[in-house]
Protein backbone atom coordinates (compact mmCIF):
# COMPACT_ATOMS: atom_id res chain seq x y z
CA UNK A 1 0.00 0.00 0.00
CA UNK A 2 1.40 3.40 -0.96
CA UNK A 3 1.84 6.33 1.40
CA UNK A 4 -1.48 7.78 2.43
CA UNK A 5 -3.73 5.05 1.01
CA UNK A 6 -4.72 3.77 4.44
CA UNK A 7 -7.98 5.32 5.64
CA UNK A 8 -7.83 7.29 8.85
CA UNK A 9 -10.00 5.30 11.23
CA UNK A 10 -11.82 7.38 13.79
CA UNK A 11 -13.06 6.08 17.14
CA UNK A 12 -16.68 6.84 16.26
CA UNK A 13 -17.80 3.52 14.86
CA UNK A 14 -21.19 4.92 13.95
CA UNK A 15 -19.74 7.19 11.25
CA UNK A 16 -21.08 6.43 7.80
CA UNK A 17 -18.60 5.24 5.19
CA UNK A 18 -19.16 8.39 3.10
CA UNK A 19 -18.44 10.64 6.05
CA UNK A 20 -15.27 8.76 6.87
CA UNK A 21 -14.15 8.87 3.23
CA UNK A 22 -14.66 12.63 3.02
CA UNK A 23 -12.91 13.12 6.32
CA UNK A 24 -9.97 11.13 4.99
CA UNK A 25 -9.90 13.35 1.89
CA UNK A 26 -9.68 16.42 4.14
CA UNK A 27 -6.76 14.92 6.08
CA UNK A 28 -5.04 13.74 2.90
CA UNK A 29 -5.35 17.23 1.39
CA UNK A 30 -3.60 18.68 4.44
CA UNK A 31 -0.90 16.04 4.11
CA UNK A 32 -0.33 16.82 0.42
CA UNK A 33 -0.52 20.62 0.66
CA UNK A 34 0.56 21.39 4.21
CA UNK A 35 -1.28 23.44 6.85
CA UNK A 36 -4.45 24.75 5.19
CA UNK A 37 -7.24 27.20 5.87
CA UNK A 38 -10.90 26.26 5.68
CA UNK A 39 -11.17 28.21 2.43
CA UNK A 40 -8.17 26.37 0.93
CA UNK A 41 -9.68 22.98 1.74
CA UNK A 42 -13.12 23.92 0.48
CA UNK A 43 -11.69 25.07 -2.86
CA UNK A 44 -9.46 22.01 -3.32
CA UNK A 45 -12.11 19.46 -2.36
CA UNK A 46 -15.17 21.09 -3.88
CA UNK A 47 -16.95 21.30 -0.52
CA UNK A 48 -18.70 24.13 1.26
CA UNK A 49 -16.75 25.82 4.03
CA UNK A 50 -19.44 24.73 6.48
CA UNK A 51 -18.90 21.08 5.50
CA UNK A 52 -15.13 21.46 5.81
CA UNK A 53 -15.50 22.97 9.29
CA UNK A 54 -17.68 20.06 10.35
CA UNK A 55 -15.10 17.51 9.22
CA UNK A 56 -12.27 19.51 10.76
CA UNK A 57 -14.11 19.64 14.09
CA UNK A 58 -14.29 15.85 14.06
CA UNK A 59 -10.64 15.49 13.05
CA UNK A 60 -9.58 17.88 15.81
CA UNK A 61 -11.63 15.89 18.34
CA UNK A 62 -9.85 12.72 17.20
CA UNK A 63 -6.41 14.41 17.44
CA UNK A 64 -5.81 13.96 13.71
CA UNK A 65 -5.44 17.69 12.98
CA UNK A 66 -4.90 20.75 15.15
CA UNK A 67 -5.54 24.46 14.52
CA UNK A 68 -2.60 26.84 14.61
CA UNK A 69 -1.66 30.36 13.60
CA UNK A 70 -0.49 30.53 10.03
CA UNK A 71 3.29 30.87 9.83
CA UNK A 72 4.38 33.84 7.73
CA UNK A 73 7.74 34.05 5.96
CA UNK A 74 8.96 37.49 4.98
CA UNK A 75 7.07 40.69 5.72
CA UNK A 76 3.94 40.17 7.83
CA UNK A 77 0.85 41.92 6.48
CA UNK A 78 -1.65 43.80 8.61
CA UNK A 79 -4.43 41.95 10.35
CA UNK A 80 -4.64 38.71 12.22
CA UNK A 81 -3.14 35.70 10.37
CA UNK A 82 -5.69 33.17 9.14
CA UNK A 83 -6.10 30.02 11.20
CA UNK A 84 -4.72 26.93 9.49
CA UNK A 85 -5.14 23.26 10.27
CA UNK A 86 -2.12 20.95 10.37
CA UNK A 87 -1.73 17.22 10.91
CA UNK A 88 -0.75 16.15 14.41
CA UNK A 89 1.75 13.36 15.08
CA UNK A 90 -1.25 11.08 15.55
CA UNK A 91 -2.61 12.20 12.19
CA UNK A 92 0.67 11.52 10.42
CA UNK A 93 0.83 8.09 12.01
CA UNK A 94 -2.48 7.28 10.33
CA UNK A 95 -0.68 7.38 7.00
CA UNK A 96 1.91 4.81 6.05
CA UNK A 97 5.34 5.74 7.37
CA UNK A 98 8.70 4.15 6.50
CA UNK A 99 10.17 4.29 9.97
CA UNK A 100 9.76 2.43 13.24
CA UNK A 101 11.50 1.98 16.56
CA UNK A 102 14.05 -0.30 14.88
CA UNK A 103 15.46 2.65 12.92
CA UNK A 104 15.84 4.73 16.07
CA UNK A 105 17.46 1.84 17.92
CA UNK A 106 19.85 1.21 15.01
CA UNK A 107 20.98 4.84 14.83
CA UNK A 108 21.40 4.99 18.58
CA UNK A 109 23.56 1.86 18.39
CA UNK A 110 25.69 3.40 15.63
CA UNK A 111 26.23 6.53 17.73
CA UNK A 112 27.14 4.56 20.86
CA UNK A 113 29.42 2.14 18.99
CA UNK A 114 31.36 5.09 17.59
CA UNK A 115 32.05 6.32 21.11
CA UNK A 116 29.14 8.70 21.62
CA UNK A 117 29.44 12.50 21.72
CA UNK A 118 30.85 14.19 18.62
CA UNK A 119 32.19 10.89 17.28
CA UNK A 120 28.76 9.33 17.57
CA UNK A 121 27.14 12.30 15.85
CA UNK A 122 29.67 12.06 13.04
CA UNK A 123 28.97 8.35 12.59
CA UNK A 124 25.22 8.96 12.32
CA UNK A 125 25.88 11.78 9.84
CA UNK A 126 28.01 9.45 7.71
CA UNK A 127 25.21 6.88 7.73
CA UNK A 128 22.67 9.55 6.74
CA UNK A 129 24.81 10.65 3.78
CA UNK A 130 25.33 7.06 2.64
CA UNK A 131 21.59 6.36 2.92
CA UNK A 132 20.76 9.31 0.67
CA UNK A 133 23.43 8.52 -1.92
CA UNK A 134 21.28 6.07 -3.91
CA UNK A 135 18.22 8.34 -3.75
CA UNK A 136 20.31 11.31 -4.86
CA UNK A 137 21.24 9.58 -8.10
CA UNK A 138 17.57 9.14 -8.99
CA UNK A 139 16.91 12.78 -8.16
CA UNK A 140 19.99 13.90 -10.12
CA UNK A 141 18.68 12.31 -13.31
CA UNK A 142 15.40 14.21 -12.98
CA UNK A 143 17.12 17.50 -12.19
CA UNK A 144 19.74 17.23 -14.93
CA UNK A 145 17.09 16.56 -17.57
CA UNK A 146 15.14 19.69 -16.62
CA UNK A 147 15.72 23.22 -17.87
CA UNK A 148 17.59 25.40 -15.33
CA UNK A 149 14.45 27.35 -14.41
CA UNK A 150 12.52 24.11 -13.83
CA UNK A 151 15.01 22.16 -11.72
CA UNK A 152 13.39 22.86 -8.37
CA UNK A 153 10.06 21.69 -9.77
CA UNK A 154 11.75 18.57 -11.15
CA UNK A 155 13.26 17.82 -7.76
CA UNK A 156 9.86 18.30 -6.13
CA UNK A 157 8.29 15.76 -8.49
CA UNK A 158 11.07 13.26 -7.80
CA UNK A 159 10.60 13.69 -4.06
CA UNK A 160 6.84 13.23 -4.44
CA UNK A 161 7.45 9.92 -6.18
CA UNK A 162 9.33 8.87 -3.03
CA UNK A 163 6.41 9.80 -0.77
CA UNK A 164 7.38 13.32 0.32
CA UNK A 165 4.37 15.13 -1.26
CA UNK A 166 6.67 17.95 -2.40
CA UNK A 167 5.87 21.17 -4.24
CA UNK A 168 7.88 24.12 -5.55
CA UNK A 169 6.73 27.72 -5.52
CA UNK A 170 8.07 31.26 -5.67
CA UNK A 171 9.34 32.43 -2.30
CA UNK A 172 7.50 35.35 -0.67
CA UNK A 173 9.36 38.39 0.61
CA UNK A 174 12.12 40.59 -0.79
CA UNK A 175 14.59 37.82 -1.67
CA UNK A 176 14.37 36.27 -5.13
CA UNK A 177 14.08 32.53 -5.06
CA UNK A 178 11.90 29.48 -4.64
CA UNK A 179 10.64 27.37 -1.78
CA UNK A 180 10.81 23.60 -1.96
CA UNK A 181 8.08 22.35 0.37
CA UNK A 182 7.81 18.75 1.56
CA UNK A 183 4.36 18.24 3.06
CA UNK A 184 5.12 14.72 4.25
CA UNK A 185 8.24 13.19 5.76
CA UNK A 186 8.42 9.37 5.95
CA UNK A 187 11.16 9.57 8.60
CA UNK A 188 9.92 12.51 10.66
CA UNK A 189 9.94 10.74 14.03
CA UNK A 190 13.45 9.41 13.48
CA UNK A 191 14.72 12.81 12.30
CA UNK A 192 13.28 14.39 15.44
CA UNK A 193 15.91 12.49 17.43
CA UNK A 194 18.61 12.47 14.74
CA UNK A 195 18.70 15.82 12.87
CA UNK A 196 21.63 14.50 10.84
CA UNK A 197 19.01 13.03 8.50
CA UNK A 198 17.68 16.52 7.74
CA UNK A 199 21.20 17.91 7.41
CA UNK A 200 22.24 15.22 4.92
CA UNK A 201 19.09 15.83 2.87
CA UNK A 202 19.79 19.58 2.74
CA UNK A 203 23.34 18.90 1.56
CA UNK A 204 21.95 16.70 -1.22
CA UNK A 205 19.54 19.43 -2.35
CA UNK A 206 22.42 21.91 -2.47
CA UNK A 207 24.57 19.62 -4.60
CA UNK A 208 21.74 18.67 -6.95
CA UNK A 209 20.69 22.28 -7.58
CA UNK A 210 24.25 23.62 -7.68
CA UNK A 211 23.65 26.41 -5.20
CA UNK A 212 23.54 27.21 -1.50
CA UNK A 213 20.14 26.38 -0.01
CA UNK A 214 18.68 27.19 3.40
CA UNK A 215 16.36 24.97 5.41
CA UNK A 216 13.71 27.20 6.97
CA UNK A 217 11.54 24.64 8.73
CA UNK A 218 11.10 20.91 9.25
CA UNK A 219 8.24 18.63 10.17
CA UNK A 220 10.61 16.80 12.52
CA UNK A 221 10.95 19.92 14.66
CA UNK A 222 7.29 20.88 14.88
CA UNK A 223 6.61 22.73 11.65
CA UNK A 224 3.77 21.74 9.37
CA UNK A 225 6.01 21.55 6.29
CA UNK A 226 9.70 20.97 5.56
CA UNK A 227 10.62 24.21 3.76
CA UNK A 228 13.87 24.85 1.89
CA UNK A 229 14.75 28.19 0.30
CA UNK A 230 16.57 28.06 -3.06
CA UNK A 231 17.91 31.41 -4.33
CA UNK A 232 17.57 32.14 -8.04
CA UNK A 233 20.78 34.14 -8.18
CA UNK A 234 23.58 32.17 -9.82
CA UNK A 235 26.09 34.16 -7.78
CA UNK A 236 25.46 31.86 -4.84
CA UNK A 237 26.21 28.70 -6.79
CA UNK A 238 29.73 28.37 -5.44
CA UNK A 239 28.77 29.03 -1.83
CA UNK A 240 30.12 26.46 0.59
CA UNK A 241 27.33 23.91 1.11
CA UNK A 242 28.38 23.44 4.72
CA UNK A 243 26.57 26.67 5.54
CA UNK A 244 23.29 25.15 4.40
CA UNK A 245 23.82 22.11 6.58
CA UNK A 246 24.49 24.17 9.69
CA UNK A 247 20.82 25.08 10.05
CA UNK A 248 19.27 21.98 8.50
CA UNK A 249 16.69 20.30 10.67
CA UNK A 250 16.55 23.18 13.12
CA UNK A 251 13.97 25.95 13.30
CA UNK A 252 15.22 29.51 12.77
CA UNK A 253 15.47 31.62 15.91
Image (spheres, helix red, strand yellow):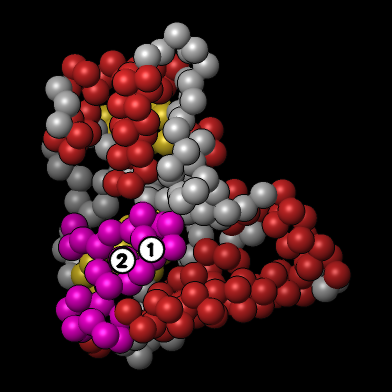
Q: Nearer the viewer, residue 19 or 42?
A: 19
Q: Is residue 178 above or below residue 51?
A: below
Q: Can the viewer see residue 66?
A: yes
Q: Does the stretch in magenta take in 82?
A: no
Q: Which mark is residue 161?
A: 1
- Packing grade of label 2 (10 A; few <14, some 14-19, many >=20) is many
- Residue at the spot 59% in from the left edge and 61% down from the top edge: 195
Q: Secondary structure at mark 1?
A: helix
Q: Position of residue 92 (x, y in %)?
A: 49, 40
Q: Position of residue 59 (x, y in %)?
A: 40, 23
Disc 1 and disc 2: Cα gap in Å? 6 Å
Q: Are marks 1 and 2 in contact (CB under 8 Å)?
A: yes
Q: Position of residue 252 (x, y in %)?
A: 43, 56
Task: State the residue position of label 2.
Answer: 157
Q: Secondary structure at mark 2?
A: helix
Q: Which mark is residue 245?
A: none
Q: Is residue 96 above or below residue 155?
A: above
Amino acid sequence: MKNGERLIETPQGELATGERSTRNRVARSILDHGPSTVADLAQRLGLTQAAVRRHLDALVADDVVAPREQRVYGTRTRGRPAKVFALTDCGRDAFDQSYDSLAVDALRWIAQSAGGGEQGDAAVAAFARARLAAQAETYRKAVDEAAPAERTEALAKALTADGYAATAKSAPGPHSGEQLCQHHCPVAHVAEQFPQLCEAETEVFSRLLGTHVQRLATIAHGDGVCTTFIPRSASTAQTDTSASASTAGRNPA
